[in-house]
Image (cartoon, rainbow, N blue to C red):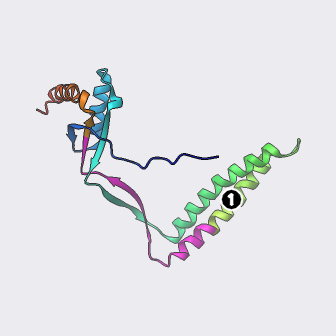
Amino acid sequence: MRTTPRPLPELPTGVPVGSYQTYAEAQRAVDFLSDNKFPVENVSILGNDLRLVERVTGRLTEGRAIGVGAAGGAWWGLFVGILLSLFAPRGANTILLLIFGIVIGVIFGIIFGWIGYRATGGQRDFTSMTQVVAGTYDVICKADHAEDARQLLARLALQRGEL
């Protein structure tokens, strides 16, 4: 069986029809085009000047690491308990299986949370969220529809008092 190789990702091509400071504004522009029956399959949003942003959300203490591990373990334990109850013989106590799964999950979560925290050696004692953010967002459109898109987006800018 031969598989055809997947094409490598490529940047979309087209003519810029609008530039926006936030993704929400670019999304609003494309939504406006769609609301006005524009063929939006000819449109793409491109982020420019990409930056990796890591937002620090708090301190990571040993207690917090153990608590997060316990909570994650409880969810996995609940899942395992549900699976056990589905395949258990008739007459088995479903509630007991669920509780057993949760308790075992919490125990393993505590252990792995503590081990994970200790393994860092204090090198990363904070929690964070990472995202890629663009400086500006361009709406581009295939050339044969670009002028119609520009006219519609100019109408949107007039409605919003941006021109």
> Does the magenta-highlighted stretch encompass residue 158?
no
Q: Position of residue 143 (x, y in %)?
A: 24, 32
Return the residue at label 1: 105
Q: Nearer the viewer, residue 38 or 20?
A: 38
- Horizontal side of residue 148 vs 115, given as left or right: left
Q: Residue furthest top?
A: 37
Question: Going 59% across and 57% down the picture, which residue do you hit?
Answer: 71
Question: Which stretch did the figure color magenta?
Answer: 112-138
Q: Please rate how many residues cluster around mark 1, counting C-alpha atoms within 10 Å: few if below 14, some from 14 to 19, many from 20.
A: many
* Depicted 35 relative to depicted 109: above or below: above
Question: Going 57% across and 66% down the picture, which residue do you hit?
Answer: 66
Q: Nearer the viewer, residue 68 or 9?
A: 9
Q: Secondary structure at mark 1?
A: helix
Look at label 1 and name its amino acid. Gly
Q: Residue furthest front?
A: 2
**Image quarter for residue 160?**
top left
Q: Residue furthest left?
A: 163
> Does the magenta-highlighted stretch encompass residue 127?
yes
* Depicted 50 relative to depicted 120: above or below: above
Specify the quadrant that holds the C terminus: top left
Q: Position of residue 119 (x, y in %)?
A: 54, 76
Q: Residue furthest bottom?
A: 121
* Depicted 62 relative to depicted 51: above or below: below
**Image quarter for residue 154?**
top left
- Horizontal side of residue 45 vs 152, given as left or right: right
- Horizontal side of residue 162 vs 44, given as left or right: left
**Image quarter for residue 38?**
top left
Question: Going 50% across and 79% down the picture, which residue do you hit?
Answer: 121
Q: Position of residue 104 (x, y in %)?
A: 72, 60
Question: Going 31% across and 29% down the picture, which residue do you hit?
Answer: 31
Q: Position of residue 114 (x, y in %)?
A: 59, 71
